[in-house]
Amino acid sequence: MAVDEKILDLRHRTQAVRLGGGEKAIEKQKAIGKMTARERIETLLDADSFQEYDTFVEHACTDFGMQGKALPGDGVVIGIGTIGGKPVAVFAQDFTVAGGSLGLMHARKITKIMDYALNMRMPLIGINDSGGARIQEGVNALAGYGEIFFRNTMASGVIPQISVILGPCAGGAVYSPALTDFVFVVDNISKMFITGPEVIKTVLGEEISMEELGGARVHCEQTGNAHFFAQSEAECFDQIRKLVATIPASNTQPAERLATVEPKTDTYRIGEIVPADPTQPYDVRDIIRAVSDGSDFVEVMELFAANIVVGFGRIDGETVGFVANQPLVMAGVLDCDSSDKAARFIRFCDAFNIPIVTIEDLPGYLPGVDQEHAGVIRHGAKLLYAYSEATVPKITVILRKAYGGGYIAMNSRHLQADFVFAWPRAEIAVMGPEGAANVIFRKEILAAEDPEQMRQLKIQEYKDKFANPYVAAAKGYVDAVIEPEQTRRCLIQALGVAKRKEALHPKKKHGIPPF
Ligand code: HXC
């Protein structure tokens, strides 16, 4: 029957496209732990939820032997499916087809799904596995990237944009992810660089492997280009599902509210986590878990600038962003990288209406020639800007040290925190008592019969005066000094009322943050 023939024809055509670059090319990918583009989509999304579009798109290039050359689907799969029932728009580049390289039609498929994502207000997930601009297509390929970058920028702050790097990604294939909100990488599979080892060898004579140049660890630990690290593609897709379940689908929709689950207080006893000795470290993530629903915490950029911790949890069923100094790493100081990391996270939370809970315990900004020359003024200013600009509910809890610029930068009352709480052990001062005594009592210490004894005396004097939360509380800079066990209750109450506020900025086109 004619209809059956047509259906068979459709199936035949679809099957041919689904084979991508052919069985041999697929085997080559599998041998290095990679899934095919469609397997990736199927693993990521809810079962049977994916509807593919533009399956039969073909390239239009005739140069450099491309005429008549079949590139199934032009090397990219696009469509819409769901994660936990929430619609998401997806594209996945197929490395078996011309190395996933981006030609004009390939780009048009991607921009089509980006337009759907933006117009229909759903997260965009791009699975990148591409050698970058398709060399044979010349300026048409570059035009394609330009169209993608423009859309990444327009969608920024409207819908969450997630990039997954699952292969050797070069050139434009890494600049589009760099414009998105979260970049996921997998050990030994993901590589990101603008120019690969071959070009570097030709131009500079330097030899370096792809892994050393732009492997997953390099981007998670050193460059800060990637936000989530996984050991396998399957683990990576689990991480993405968890993130999508936590964040809103757009800037006009709230994140899903879940039933409140009490923290695991047997494991995370908040009053016992912070050592009395202010020089002793502890893991601030234990504090976050002690106040979060179910003690769940989705950490973002765990391996980069670990002196600050950022990520998502829930309080009383609602998603919040945590920003916390980490006394376990460099005493939790602020530096260039931690300021960058936190500022960007704060801006994501603010754009998507996610309240920010700041947990503070830091000795200030990191002093040093390296930091000064690396631009700590500029980078540190990003944090001041991001907190000041944010209009979402902003709550701070000062656990222990809050010194100098660190005190101001970590969402102080002066940057318009909605509520500031301090534990009785908090020390709010311009600097630590030792440093302070050495500066302001230098003459007395030098002139003393026993300078060391005098130094200790003056340190104690300074401690008695300033190393507590009550001077700040007396001025109203701290709203309440609370017992540690009251922290979660105070956060629930503060978040509940702060979300009612209406915060307005002066009229402007946009601000000019210290990028
Ligand atoms: C056309 C490409 C391609 C590209 C790879 N291929 N990259 N075809 N244009 N950009 C093809 C290869 O010819 C090969 O085809 C197949 O894909 C697999 O590639 P291999 O080299 O065999 O794979 P591998 O050894 O894993 O190396 C992957 C790679 C390498 C590191 C990505 O292919 C590479 O360096 N490619 C070029 C990267 C690059 O310089 N891109 C342009 C960036 S400029 P066959 O037929 O042999 O299977 C850019 C502009 C935008 O993107 C800039 C924005 C600011």
Image (spheres, rainbow, N blue to C red):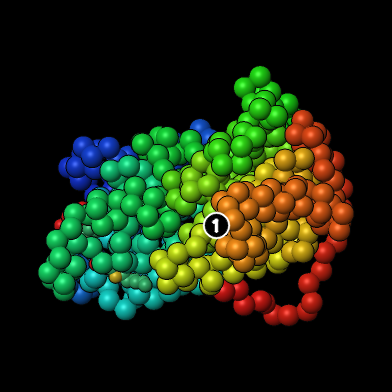
The residue at which mark 1 appears reads as 334
Q: Position of residue 194 (x, y in %)?
A: 31, 66
Front-most of residues 135 and 237? 237
Return the residue nearer the eye: 356 or 128: 356
Residue 334 spot, x, y in % from top left:
55, 57
Which amino acid, by three-letter code, is at mark 1?
Answer: Leu
Could you tell me if residue 406 is visible in this image?
no
Residue beneath the point at 40% across and 39% down: 230
Of 173 and 18, the residue lying toward us: 173
Picture residue at 42% right of the left edge, 72% below the top:
373
Residue extending farthest to the front is 449
Q: Is residue 465 above or below residue 206?
A: above
Q: Position of residue 297 (x, y in %)?
A: 59, 37
* Label 1 residue SS: loop
Res 430 seen here: yes
Q: State the residue at coordinates (32%, 78%).
A: 139
